[in-house]
Image (cartoon, grey):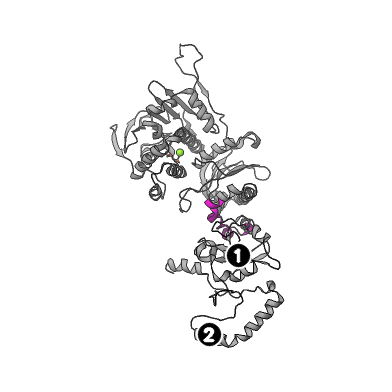
Amino acid sequence: CAQKETLGFQTEVKQLLHLMIHSLYSNQEIFLRELISNASDAADKLRFEALAKPELLEESPQLKIRLSFDSAARTLTIEDNGIGMSREEVIANLGTIAKSGTSDFLKQLSGDQKKDAHLIGQFGVGFYSAFIVADEVSVETRRAGASADSGVRWVSKGEGEFTIEAIERAERGTRITLHLKEACAEYADGWRLRNLIKKYSDHIALPIELPKEASGEDDKPAEPEWETANRASALWTRARTEVKDEEYGEFYKHIAHDFEDPLAWSHNKVEGKLEYTSLLYVPGRAPFDLYHREAPKGLKLYVQRVFIMDQAEQFLPLYLRFIKGVVDSNDLSLNVSREILQKDPNIDAMRGALTKRVLDMLEKLAKNDGEKYAKFWKAFGSVIKEGPAEDFANKEKIAGLLRFASTHAGNAEETVSLADYIARMVEGQDKLYYLTGESYDQVKNSPHLEVFRKKGIEVLLLTDRIDEWLMSYLTEFDGKQFVDVARGDLDLGALDSEEDKKAQEEVSKAKEGLLERLKKALSEQVSEVRVSHRLTDSPAILAIGEQDMGLQMRRILEASGQ
Ligand code: ADP
Ligand code: MG
């Protein structure tokens, strides 16, 4: 029916709109990048669907984006001839937010403009950012392959509801018209738009066209002429030396839906048995849904420059799920599917190589820029800790990337690498000592540390929830064994002087009687009583058996009712 219908936005959309308009005002120009990014995605999707159904390209196989404006009417229009949307898609995509965890995320927002701007960036602003600069937005769209009378018009002032109606639309694709706020009139201007395209969207692989500037004469031609304002080639196909850092940064923002710069990237062309190009990024911060199971992960897959799928998960292990990027293969078939990817042995080889690239990139970041690495570790350290369990082959490399708190640093920050630790080992020490616990404050004064303090031996303090589980997979590094100082009998013999040893023997002998009595009295509660030389101040200590489950694990299992 051609009647106009009024529908309400989902509550989350209303909240997001409100927050975005207020907290992103100083970042307002990003709206253009977001809308162009969507138009480019729409072209990618059409090109992909047209592989199986070439008729979808209709009479206009040349995919492009066009910007036009009317400064007198204060409007700006962004038009693409991509996949378009059906009525149902419009309602779902431009009326709701489907990401899991959205309402939890929105609860974190504080009303503090700066903090919220940062958080919203982490969430991804997308289409709704149009309302930062516009007081009314109209979207006219028709899905590729659908008939001209199944066009849809969506109109909203961004205040809680939108209208939707059926329209005739001869062209496939989407036209978005922004009625700019008075204070945002500057965006209805060719020079301003050209600059924004250069700044944010030069890397977009299809042409972004603007009306050609009138050449001084007053009589305008009836048909506007168009000119391309961007470079219009896929960034990853260019030579590394020809791509500027800013361009790598903008491309990252487009594919990652982030608006902060990445920490590092690695761009490689691989030739030989398998031919592919990869461009991998380390983000500067964790997405809001890093720990959601259904959160998007994986790389964008292209085959010979044709977009195939988002979130191709087969190219990286789970513990590197935060890496964003593109892989463009010359060998895969254009009709490759997720199922095929899962079975293809070539993908395993690529996954191995890409994993190594990421680990090398992180190693390099740690070596060359400690500050950035610390930022990386804060955001993703806990995820990297899943590595040794998942990726046996790269265990040693991953261990080299780990950072811990320790008795040397004397604070709760995870800054100590295993290499740092080894460099500080005392003479005769051949083991890596660690202690796990609930919190830094709880472990820092543990009686288990007394003897180590006395001998000047550093102990790693592991208080992240995942640490004990991590250590059950990490048994050695650089040929040296890890030892939990809370377990069994600590053999620090090699580190004792002859004098110490003699004194210890005497003590042991003198306490034999006491030991017997304690064993009898505690026989129900403990499996063994021993004389220990590891305490200096405390009279006694409870130790865990060599083979027993650690305390942290016990608590986790207890908490989960096991
Ligand atoms: P994202 O791009 O992260 O998915 P957006 O808020 O930017 O989120 O867009 C929401 C959805 O709306 C897109 O995923 C897409 O399905 C749809 N959409 C937006 N713009 C267009 C467009 N120009 N053509 C077709 N679909 C679009
Ligand atoms: Mg988008």
Q: Quadrant of residue 248?
A: top right
Gap in Å between the C-alphas at discs 1 and 2? 30 Å
How packed mark 2 is, by other alpha carbons closer than 10 Å (few <14, some 14-19, many 20 or more), is few
Mark 2 residue type: Leu
Instruction: Check residue 392 for magenta coloring.
Output: yes
Q: Which residue is mark 1?
A: 459
Q: Residue at x 39, y 29 (%)?
A: 178
Residue 365: numbered disc? none
Left/right placement of residue 270 relative to residue 465 reads right
Instruction: Say which label, 1 or 2, has the lower sequence index.
Output: 1
**Magenta stretch: dominant SS?**
helix
Residue 271 in sight here: yes
Mark 1 residue type: Val
Instruction: Check residue 324 for magenta coloring.
Output: no
Residue 139 in sight here: no
**Rendered location of residue 36, percent (x, y):** 47, 33
Q: Quadrant of the C terminus?
A: bottom left
Q: Which residue is mark 2?
A: 518
**Rendered location of residue 147, percent (x, y):** 38, 31
Q: Secondary structure at mark 2?
A: helix
Magenta segment? 376-394
In the image, residue 96 above or below residue 169: below
